[in-house]
């Protein structure tokens, strides 16, 4: 079974499931179950509108995958529908104007490093069940509570306590970083490198600002302010 048979992609409105078109249905079920298990607390308590694309599902297969999500993810599944592609839009995009092509090129060049690119600022606490995603750098001016998920293709900086799930460099950029005034996530991921904090991680009373980064396919965490 290929690990790419089923891919989960978080969106602002919920979750998109990308299914390998040529995969057999049993393979799809097994892969989806593994994805749900590996996601851990990602879904728990969330309310998700789910769309799928790639493989064509009949009504029985669609119903079975819907039930699998409801029973094993821990999330409330608001809907489970096929993602419809607007063919007219696809035709228009096949030969985009020069200015649009330039914008597309810029998009893929933005996050080869960590020092530039679009940045979104979010002010407030990210609560359990919330999902915040952005195609760029993401700065949270507040806390990220357990059960919340934040994801960005660039860097993520939290000006508060980070105790939820965080995924920086979600487009595969291992140059991305995660920084927080209190870094204690339930899951920390940069590109495809995943780690969890040790059980003995300190409480908010003795948190220090920390920075997470990838070096040589290993994820490291260190203080980012000088010690005095």
Image (spheres, rainbow, N blue to C red):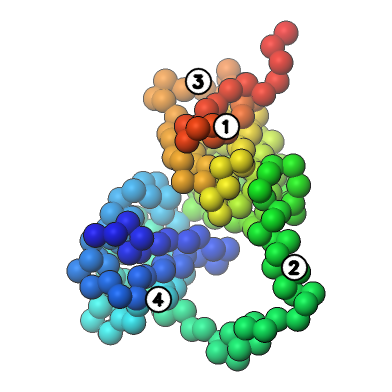
What's the residue at 67%, 24% (across, down)?
224
- The percent coordinates of residue 148 (x first, y second) are 51, 48
What's the residue at 23%, 81% (across, down)?
60
Above-or-below relation of 69 to 165: below
- Could you give the CA–CA distance between mark 1 and mark 3, rounded to whole angstroms? 16 Å
SS at circle 1: strand
Displayed quadrant of residue 227: top right
SS at circle 4: loop
Above-or-below relation of 188 to 226: below
- The percent coordinates of residue 220 (x first, y second) are 52, 28
Name the residue beneath numbered marker 3: 202
Q: Are marks 3 and 2 in contact (CB under 8 Å)?
A: no
SS at circle 3: loop
Q: Which is closer to the viewer, label 3 or label 2?
A: 2
Name the residue beneath numbered marker 1: 212
- Could you give the CA–CA distance between mark 3 and mark 4, rounded to whole angstroms? 44 Å
Name the residue beneath numbered marker 4: 54
Residue 103 got which mark?
Answer: 2
Q: Is residue 78 left or right of residue 74?
A: right
> In the image as oriented, which residue stretches furthest toward the right?
99
> In the image as oriented, which residue stretches furthest toward the bottom?
88
- The percent coordinates of residue 27 (x first, y second) are 23, 66
Which of the two labelled residues, at mark 3 and mark 2, occupies the earlier sequence position?
2
Which of the two labelled residues, at mark 1 and mark 4, occupies the earlier sequence position?
4
Q: How many marks?
A: 4
Mark 1 closeness class: few <14, some 14–19, many ≥20 residues within 10 Å: many
Mark 4 closeness class: few <14, some 14–19, many ≥20 residues within 10 Å: some
- The percent coordinates of residue 126 (x first, y second) are 59, 47
What's the residue at 71%, 54% (across, down)?
110
Displayed quadrant of residue 64: bottom left
Above-or-below relation of 151 to 203: below
SS at circle 2: helix
């Amino acid at each position: 079974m290929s690990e790419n048979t089923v891919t989960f992609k978080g969106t602002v409105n919920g979750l998109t499931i990308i299914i390998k078109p040529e995969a057999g249905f049993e393979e799809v079920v097994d892969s989806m179950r593994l994805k749900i298990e590996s996601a851990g607390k990602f879904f728990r308590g969330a309310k998700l509108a789910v769309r799928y694309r790639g493989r064509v599902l009949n009504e029985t297969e669609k119903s079975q995958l819907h039930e699998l999500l409801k029973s094993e993810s821990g999330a409330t599944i608001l809907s489970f529908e096929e993602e419809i592609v607007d063919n007219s839009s696809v035709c228009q995009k096949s030969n985009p104007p020069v200015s649009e092509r330039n914008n597309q090129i810029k998009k893929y060049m933005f996050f080869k490093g960590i020092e530039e690119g679009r940045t979104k600022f979010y002010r407030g606490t990210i609560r359990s069940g919330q999902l915040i995603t952005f195609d760029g750098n993401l700065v949270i001016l507040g806390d990220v509570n357990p059960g919340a998920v934040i994801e960005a293709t660039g860097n993520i900086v939290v000006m508060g306590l980070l105790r939820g799930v965080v995924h920086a460099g979600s487009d595969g950029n291992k140059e991305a970083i995660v920084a927080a005034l209190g870094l204690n996530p339930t899951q920390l991921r940069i590109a495809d490198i995943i780690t969890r904090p040790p059980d003995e991680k300190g409480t908010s009373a003795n948190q220090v600002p920390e920075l997470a980064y990838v070096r040589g396919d290993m994820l490291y965490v260190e203080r980012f302010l000088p010690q005095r």
